[in-house]
């Protein structure tokens, strides 16, 4: 849809030279230096270099409150969220707090009673610690303390409801706060005002992991255990890695440390049974785990539970220590994911008319809004992402909710802060038209009144145009430039797989000109090519396109082992034709 611009990443020569001197392969040194790595410690991703928990505002108060509750035998309920970050954060909180409680003499039964969880069903309660969820928790558990994970920073009314019932609340979150903060016992959120923690991109699961580290330190200072006998919280890093990658937060140096060591545990076979079961259900080998497995295989299966049913199923899979139960739950999640795909495909077909009309516009809007009364509100976020990828425009997809409201989910393009756009839209709509909205730069959610639908569609694009230059709607393809043809080989593919790539630390994408020797179709939906460069021939795939290439083509590409033929050869994956 949009014009394509090509830009080559430039490596800082002095950093590239320094990394090469430290023993990094020349290709890795170049890629790291082109991604802002400034010293070897950032590239090595050592766990010892993690930012300290003390850098998070409110951490000491949260840790001491939790330590007090554990020592007093209080009943603690973790209130989670229905996405992958929320599910893994819930599992990390429950597992970690039970580990700490065991050191105080509690047995398995006592741990299960004193540390439990509750996750809102998105269709019945919506997102976050609402007053209704507080009431539900009070009736089911009679808790002394609620701990929110991956939510809570906007739950002013929910925390107030808990306070009125005499239930304490600790908020752990990473979402952007509103103008008013909840009156909780403690708030740990790197994005709250006054917090100087350097990793503003840490996921909800990472925040909770840090809270556990600080709580363990408090208990250690109180003499409950020493450094040698303390619980090994690094056993939770596989869960931290999954939630971090699946939430598509920026993989800054600190997040890469967390993900790197989580992947190492998985490859070594020391992951939670649920993680291993999800790998096997997805047909992936945990011994060769990479970050992409988290984002494209495990994450969607966990998210399917929250989208279609109840995330409790996913959390149970991550909490069980029984391999057979984990396998059965993973299979159930796999079936849900297949159903999610079917629903998504139906919704994409429904949206095709809107997409085609948009493409044919002489002056298309800066934003896309699609709505359908037959759509499933659990899948609109994925639909928005697919349309955004196709049209390269910030996109909102809406499905009917309750009480005459529409539920919306949006995805954005780099340079357009979606939550800020919605903030301006809400100010320009009549009061009460958009009762709720929130989110991040790249993803956001909202509720909308029926009578505001048409004004919202017009205002969404207008507000983007008012806030941003039109250049942000031109897709820029960044590559790492040319590499020697000899590098397109299995040993280099393995070398690249040793690193963590993802949001904000993009996987390598190279750019070279190839001779096109042959083209054939795969399942009438994809293309397979035979390419030649510098006397070497390569098999190449291009997904979701049947177009032939010219005799000579400049390609943006990556390469990987060809597991279909045994993995000894490599295949090129064509991402763009430049």
Image (tube, helix red, strand yellow):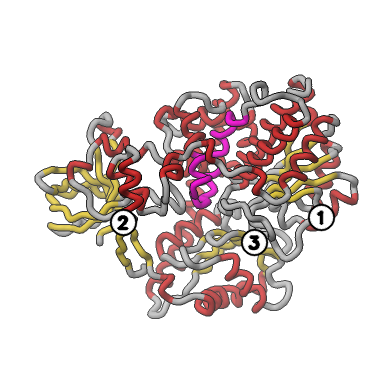
Count neighbours of disc 2 (C-alpha within 10 A) and say few if under 14, some if 14 to 19, many if 20 or more: many
Q: Looking at the picture, how far across and down is residue 405, in whole percent? A: 69, 64
Q: Is residue 131 left or right of residue 25?
A: right
Residue 392 vs 304, above or below: the answer is: below
Q: Which residue is mark 3?
A: 438
The reply to whether the magenta stretch includes residue 247 is yes
SS at badge 3: strand
Residue 79 locus on image (x, y percent): 73, 43
The residue lying at 56 percent from left, 26 percent from top is 273
Magenta-drawn stretch contains 312: no
Q: Is residue 510 above or below residue 23?
A: below
Residue 81 in view:
yes
Predominant secondary structure in magenta?
helix
Residue at the image position 16 percent from the left and 53 percent from the top: 514
From the top left corner, tell me how far across and down residue 349 is, in percent: 45, 58
Q: Tell me the SS state at disc 1.
A: loop
Quarter of the picture containing the N terminus is bottom left
Which labelled disc corresponds to residue 479? 2
Q: Which residues are magenta?
A: 233-259
Residue 449: which quarter of the image? Answer: bottom right
Q: CA distance from mark 1 to mark 2?
A: 47 Å
* First in sequence: mark 3 vs mark 2: 3
Q: Is residue 310 visible?
A: no
| Disc ID at residue 532 | none
Task: Give the mark nearer the N terminus: 1 vs 3.
Answer: 1
Instruction: Tell me the quarter of the picture where residue 98 sits.
Output: top right
Give 164 or 10, whichever is nearer the viewer. 10
| Quadrant housing the C terminus | bottom left
- According to the image, label 1 marks what residue? 183
Which mark is in front, 1 or 3? 1
């Amino acid at each position: 849809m949009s014009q394509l611009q090509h830009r080559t990443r430039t490596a800082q020569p002095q950093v590239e030279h320094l990394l090469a001197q430290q023993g990094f392969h020349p290709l890795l040194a170049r890629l790291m230096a082109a991604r802002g790595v400034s010293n070897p410690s950032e590239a090595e991703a050592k766990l010892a270099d993690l930012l300290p928990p003390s850098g998070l505002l409110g951490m000491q108060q949260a840790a001491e409150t939790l330590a007090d509750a554990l020592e007093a035998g209080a009943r603690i309920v973790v209130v989670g969220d229905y996405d992958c970050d929320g599910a893994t954060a819930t599992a990390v909180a429950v597992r970690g707090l039970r580990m700490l409680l065991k050191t105080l003499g509690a047995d398995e039964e006592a741990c299960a009673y004193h540390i439990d969880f509750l996750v809102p069903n998105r269709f019945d309660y919506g997102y976050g610690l609402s007053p209704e969820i507080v009431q539900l928790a009070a009736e089911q558990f009679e808790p002394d303390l609620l701990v929110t994970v991956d939510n809570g920073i906007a739950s002013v009314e929910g925390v107030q409801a808990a306070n009125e019932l005499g239930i304490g609340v600790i908020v752990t979150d990473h979402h952007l706060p509103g103008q008013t903060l909840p009156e909780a016992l403690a708030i740990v959120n790197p994005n709250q005002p006054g917090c100087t923690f350097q990793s503003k991109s840490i996921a909800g699961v990472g925040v909770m992991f840090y809270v556990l580290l600080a709580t363990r330190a408090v208990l250690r200072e109180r003499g409950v255990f020493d450094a040698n006998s303390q619980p090994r919280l690094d056993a939770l890093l596989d869960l931290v890695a999954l939630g971090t990658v699946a939430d598509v937060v920026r993989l800054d140096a600190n997040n890469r440390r967390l993900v790197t060591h989580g992947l190492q545990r998985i490859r070594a076979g020391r992951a939670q049974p649920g993680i291993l079961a999800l790998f096997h259900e997805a047909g992936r080998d945990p011994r060769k785990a990479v970050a992409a497995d988290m984002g494209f295989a495990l994450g969607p299966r966990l998210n399917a539970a929250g989208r279609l049913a109840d995330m409790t199923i996913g959390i149970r899979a991550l909490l069980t220590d029984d391999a057979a139960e984990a396998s059965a739950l993973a299979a159930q999640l796999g079936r849900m994911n297949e159903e999610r795909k079917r629903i998504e495909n139906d919704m994409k077909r429904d949206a095709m008319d809107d997409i085609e009309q948009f493409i044919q516009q002489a002056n298309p809007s800066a934003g896309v809004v699609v709505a359908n009364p037959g759509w499933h509100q659990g899948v609109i976020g994925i639909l928005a992402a697919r349309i955004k990828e196709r049209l390269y425009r910030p996109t909102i997809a809406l499905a009917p909710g309750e009480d005459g409201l529409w539920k919306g989910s949006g995805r954005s393009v780099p340079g357009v802060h979606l939550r800020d756009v919605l903030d301006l839209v809400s100010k320009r709509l009549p009061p009460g038209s958009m009762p709720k909205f929130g989110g991040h730069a790249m993803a956001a959610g909202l509720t909308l009144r029926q009578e505001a639908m048409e004004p919202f569609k017009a205002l969404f694009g207008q507000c983007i145009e008012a806030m941003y230059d039109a250049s942000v709607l031109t897709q820029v393809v960044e590559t790492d430039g040319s590499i020697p043809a000899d590098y397109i080989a299995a040993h280099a593919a393995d070398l690249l797989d040793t690193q963590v790539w993802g949001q904000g630390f993009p996987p390598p994408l190279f750019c070279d000109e190839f001779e096109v020797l042959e083209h054939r179709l795969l399942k009438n939906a994809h293309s397979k090519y035979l390419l030649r460069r510098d006397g070497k021939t390569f098999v190449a795939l291009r997904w979701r396109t049947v177009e032939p290439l010219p005799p000579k083509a400049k390609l943006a590409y990556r390469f990987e082992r060809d597991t279909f033929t045994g993995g000894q050869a490599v295949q090129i994956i064509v991402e763009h034709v430049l």
